[in-house]
Image (cartoon, helix red, strand yellow):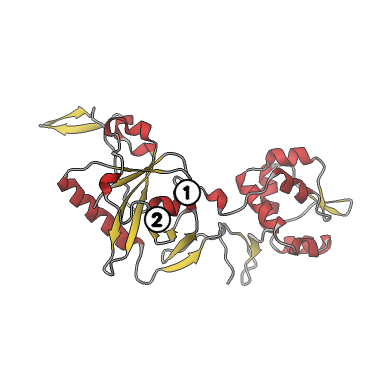
Amino acid sequence: MTLYAACGPKGQLQIKRVPLNHQVQVEVQRLFEVQHAEFLQPDTHEIPYDGNYKPDEDEVLVLQNIQEIAQFNRAVGVNATSFQLLDTGEIEEEDVKALFVVHLDANGASKVLIQAFSVGQILRRKFSLISHGNQFRRMDESAFSLSNHLAAVVEAGSMKFRSDHTIRRFVDLREVYRIATDDDVRGFAQIAQFDVQDEDHLLSITNNVTRRLIANIMDDQNIRAMNVTQLTQAASATGLNLLINNGNITIPTTKHELRELLKFLSEDRYSGPISGQAFESNSKRPA
């Protein structure tokens, strides 16, 4: 089994071979196989990824048809020596985003087992001590640590994972879910039920989180079908009081209050059906 490194910018990953001696190669193989068994259990449920759901322990998210899958699959079924060696003396300059191996399961199917990699795993960047005789000395050699878990598994045309935050190190998720553009934000401000005093200020206080929420709201026609009274009553049921100006809902001018309103409008804020307690959710999928 060969250890590979995926290097360079997301979407343009270069595959390089990590040189290992035989004993380390055997140990790395064993490590990845154990992590694979922990990552995918026989009863693991697969959920298509849409950016809105965080999986439970017995679930994995699944992406398909993204360019990074093809890039990792380049190492499947080819001679490992066809790949350039990783420069062990300049690992910081190699811009490693992930480490991975190709694994053959009991049915002969190939899987790519992927660990995310960050500069924090490069030990030479730190003040690292290594045992030498009965003392410790400072480590001068180039070195890095492996992760204690897999970030993803690629099988044929699918990538399975649990945390989109982790795979962002080597996958460009912007092609998967939509983030509102400036035009989308201005379009949101023009929704008839809303009152926005300053569109430029609204643009200035949005970030990736709130722009994702705005994109979801703009793609959902339900908001436009409800009047201000209906929206105000629905918000009140979740413990959120909306401000009304000239008969329309005032869009807040602070980041925190804007996020609260957007969470409600995207149905990520709700009232518990039993307790009546207001809750916020950071994960959802249709039942």
In percent of the image, x 45 and y 45: which residue is there?
A: 169
Looking at this view, name the residue that lies furthest to the left: 133
Task: Tell me: 190 left or right of 272.
Answer: right
Q: Which amino acid does label 2 sit on?
A: Ala
- Rate crowding at label 1 as few (under 14), some (14 to 19) or many (20 or more) other CA atoms within 10 Å: many
Q: Residue at (22%, 55%) from the top-left corner?
A: 30
Q: In which quarter of the image is the C terminus?
A: bottom right
Q: Which residue is drawn at 68% across and 40% down?
A: 205
Of 219 and 86, which appears nearest the observer? 86
Q: Image quarter for residue 286? A: bottom right
Answer yes or no: do the residues labelled 1 and 2 have beta carbons within 8 Å?
A: yes
Which image quadrant is residue 105 in? bottom left
Whole-percent x, y for residue 237 in the image: 72, 64
- Classify mark 2: helix, strand or loop: strand
Q: Count the marks: how many?
A: 2
Q: Mark 1 points at which residue?
A: 171
Q: Can the viewer see residue 126?
A: no
Q: Which mark is residue 152?
A: 2
Q: In which quarter of the image is residue 218?
A: bottom right
**Is 240 or 55 nearer to us in this picture?**
55
User: What x and y, as percent, mark residue 254?
Assistant: 70, 42
Disc sitting over residue 85 in the figure: none
C-alpha gap between disc 1 and disc 2 = 11 Å
**Earlier-in-chain disc, 1 versus 2:** 2
Amino acid at dot 1: Val
- Compared to residue 42, the image places residue 246 above or below, namely above
Neighbour class for label 2 at 10 Å: few (<14), some, many (≥20)? many
